Amino acid sequence: MQLTEIFTPGTVLPKLEASTKRQVLRTLADAAGEALGLNPKAVFEALHHRERLGSTGIGEGVALPHAKVPGLDRLAGWVACLEQPVDFDAIDDKPVDLVVLLLAPEGAGTEHLRVLAQLSRLARDHHRCARLRGCDSATALWESLTGPDRRKAA
């Protein structure tokens, strides 16, 4: 599966304003719910439940929140650069300013795990993350996330 099948220029938020982890998740859940025809509250609850199991703040200012969502029929993703970093209970205790969200259907097999692994590798690429943080438009952010090689996620 290509990252371009999961992320589109419409699922990119280059300058998200939020002051807490909860606000970040709520804003992303609202955007996802609206775009996917799902109840935003259900999306938020799935994300919140996953965060209670352990923070998805993976360090170096990056978070990869993810959840299985009832009613979803495909993998869907959002990426957001935050205007100001927020505390995300990350493993390195550093605030987060780059958030990559992945939503999966309830019955998702291993495909979403392969995509999460791909996104985790991308998040550990300091140069790529710096490029993402430097984008000032949704299109630029999407192109930086999915290109230039547009590597497969699986």
Image (cartoon, grey):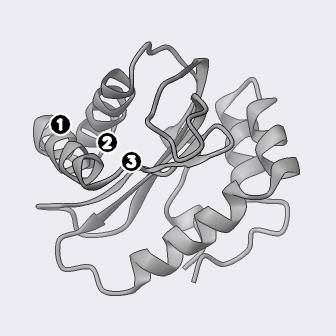
Type of amino acid under label 1:
Pro
Rounded to the nearest whole Å, what is the CA distance between mark 3 and mark 1?
Answer: 20 Å
Report which quarter residue 133 is drawn in: top right
Dot 2 or dot 3, earlier in sequence = 2
> As rendered, which of 27 and 65 lies closer to the eye?
65
Residue located beneath label 2 in the image: 32
Question: How far apart, in angstroms, are the residues tagged by discs 1 and 2?
Answer: 7 Å
Which label lies toward us, 3 or 1? Answer: 3
User: Which picture quadrant has residue 112?
Assistant: bottom left
Badges 2 and 3: C-beta atoms under 8 Å apart?
A: no
Q: Residue at coordinates 21% horizontally, 62% vertically from top-left?
A: 72
- Say the numbered circle drawn on residue 40: 1
For the point 68% across and 67% down, the residue is 121
Contact (Cβ within 8 Å) of mark 1 with mark 2: yes
Q: Secondary structure at mark 2?
A: helix
Residue 109 location (% of width, % of height): 30, 86
The residue shown at (61%, 64%) is 120
Mark identifier at residue 48: none
Residue 117 picture location, percent across and down? 56, 73
For residue 22, side relative to residue 20 (left or right): left
